[in-house]
Image (cartoon, rainbow, N blue to C red):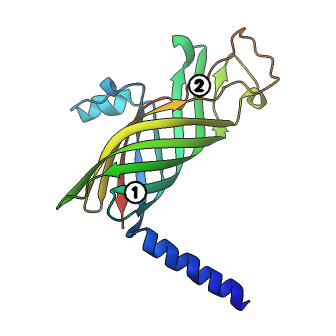
Amino acid sequence: MKKYALLLTLVLLSATTTFSQVRFGIKGGLGFANMSNVSSNLENTWNNQTGYHFGLALQMKVPFIGLAIQPELLYSTVRTTLENDPANEVNIDYLTLPINLQLGADLLLFRPFILASPFVSYVMKNNTRLEDQPFDDINRFDYGIGLGAGIDIWKLQIVGKYNWGLGKLQSAGAQWDQAETYKNATLQGFQLSVALLF
């Protein structure tokens, strides 16, 4: 028992020395088909959104080199159509785990950064009318990568990034009405987020 307690203490001390600052936070934002859907008119921006997300974030900063690791757990909703066909309407809720790797510069009052964000997602709820395909024929898992930039201003963080979903929307072995197997584009698009970190 003493060995385990000593090991746990060493791990905690190592984490403390590795990361100069650890902050927890809440995060939320909107998803868009592309960046042009975000405008200075808040009403137009809201009407153009294709989904929203909210959840928790943990930011861990590595001292001196400007690197921060920020894993998040987000509930994401997506509304879109495939191939611009209203019959192929997609409305799916995901639980998403992105790992944001941020590289920036700690300036006096703010910290600008660029980021790469690999993610995995799991379908939590389906409201899809995808040519009457059964929910069991939809692939529950997705994965992909996001690239973007952001800024930390005291406890406020603002991030804009573009996500690419790389998985297949159709599950393995499913026989869909469509001849083509759709790529999972439901998590693809521009994402604008705001977080409060404490």
Is 153 rendered above or below residue 127?
below
Left or right of 181 on screen, residue 58: left
The local crowd at label 1, few if under 14, some if 14 to 19, many if 20 or more residues have their Cα within 10 Å, is many
Left or right of 177 on screen, residue 97: left
Near-viewer residue (56 or 129): 56
Name, please, the residue furthest toward the front: 65
Going by the numbered disc 2, the residue's amino acid type is Val
Quarter residue 39 falls in: top left
Q: Nearer the viewer, mark 2 or mark 1?
A: 1
Residue behind mark 2 = 90
Is 64 rendered above or below residue 185?
below
Near-viewer residue (37 or 164): 164
Near-viewer residue (127 or 138): 138
Disc ID at residue 104: none
Quadrant housing the N terminus: bottom right
Q: Secondary structure at mark 1?
A: strand
Left or right of 104 on screen, residue 133: right
The local crowd at label 2, few if under 14, some if 14 to 19, many if 20 or more residues have their Cα within 10 Å, is many
Disc ID at residue 68: 1
> Disc 2 and disc 1: Cα gap in Å?
34 Å
Q: Residue at x 52, y 29 (%)?
A: 79
Query: Which sits earlier in the primary sequence, circle 2 or circle 1?
Result: 1
Going by the numbered disc 1, the residue's amino acid type is Ala
Is 134 rendered above or below residue 12?
above
Percent coordinates x, y for residue 82 in the rendering: 56, 17
Percent coordinates x, y for residue 85 in the rendering: 55, 11
Percent coordinates x, y for residue 149 in the rendering: 33, 41
Q: Residue at x 70, y 87 (%)?
A: 3
Q: Residue at x 59, y 39 (%)?
A: 93
Is 4 rendered above or below residue 70?
below
Quadrant housing the C terminus: bottom left
